[in-house]
Image (spheres, rainbow, N blue to C red):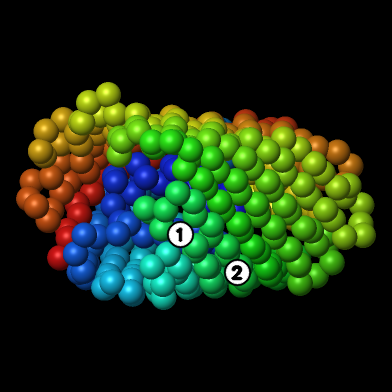
Amino acid sequence: MCFRCWLIILSLSSFAALANDKTYFLDRQNGDMLKYRDDQAMLDLTIKAKHTDNHLYENDADKQSTGYLEISPSIKAQYHNDEHFLQLGLWLKNRKFNDFSEDDTTDRYGLLKYHHKFRAKQSVILTGAFFNQYLDRGIGLSKGIGSSLLERDNRKSNFINIAHQLGNENSNATLTSLIGFRNTEYKNRPEVTDGLNLSAVYSIFDFQYLLSGKSYLTAKLSLEDINHDLPLQQDRLVSTALVGIKWHKTEFTHFDLSLGTLKIDFDDGSLANKQDFKWDFKFKWSPIEAIELTAISVRTVDENRQIENSYLISDKLGLNFSYQMNDNIEIYLQNSMDIFDYYFETGNETEQGFTSDMTVIYKFRSNMSLSLSYFHQKLSSFNITNEYQKNTISAGISFVL
């Protein structure tokens, strides 16, 4: 996943995190956690009963429904002083299905982040994370053939990076330079998945300059050299360059717009090099304290989701809404539309995805809450056998210890 992917996740996850876990954002290249005012350790436990009408992401005529239980414990801890800042987190998600016991799995995620300020305006940041995920049958590499798989694809990935930050939140200018390494490996179906195992070295340069008040000039450059274990996929160098404006009037009003270019350079092979326009837009607004609106639009180069030699460019539009009705009730609405352009040796194809999520949270104690959710997914594809609609409802209870 390239640099811009973590920006998407960070933007969209702000609402998802509030609805489910208010303290972390993770992806496969970088990680960030919200900073608590005080040092603490926190243990969360969420238990949800869910029901879906299309477990394997199939066409309407072949849909199979099921209920399942999802248990998600997590632990997060923080320690800091004037020079050091340390955070760690561990998240588990266990699912047990009524009718598909072969899909009973446990996802695991972990993050360690250390920030050392060795001078007043210079810091070093070390980050490492691991991910052990079991992907739903019927999406990704098993799109359209979920019922033919005996088990979920198991994907393991990790990253480690080091960053140098020049400047701080009170500086007129800041420059963050980051270099990292990540890898991804599938642990089953080797005859299909081995070609997608990869490792990558990446670097990110992020500069911002205070123009006036709360307005900043921003510039970002990212480079990622991706190498696959087998020559079934072409190795590639993905680079992006963005220049933009950031205006953060208050904590509740943010406007970020960056424009630039992306480029994909392939080693010898049948795929042609690609250069395209790139943008990254985020807007957050709270007309009153209880309401928050967020809009994003971004183009990214994503991880490959096809067995064939190919690559994927995605355009995402997200619209989110949150409303704190009173001290006990919160409502979250999240909607996103994605356009997926797959580029193969013989041409390109397009898919469109849509998701909508509504969650209501009732906090009946300071450390306990109930939630009700409805989640809708839809995919329109160039291959009609890959199209699906899926609806999931859930009821849950969360504890903070």
Residue in view at x 79 percent, y 58 percent: 236
Q: Nearer the viewer, residue 146 or 337?
A: 337
Q: Nearer the viewer, residue 1 or 256?
A: 256
User: What SS does tag 1 mark?
Assistant: loop
- Total marks shown come to 2
Q: Which quadrant would residue 293 be assigned to in this image?
A: top left
User: Quick one: label 2, few (<14), some, or many (20+) residues within 10 Å?
Assistant: many
Q: Which residue is mark 1?
A: 167
**Residue 174: where, in percent of width, then height?**
49, 54
Residue in view at x 80 percent, y 37 percent: 348
Residue type (three-letter) at the residue carrying disc 1: Gly
* Dot in front, 2 or 1: 1
Residue 114 vs 305, above or below: the answer is below
Which quarter shows the C terminus? bottom left
Q: Which residue is mark 2?
A: 180
Q: Find the distance from the CA under tag 2 to the CA under tag 1.
A: 21 Å
Q: Is residue 78 left or right of residue 215?
A: left
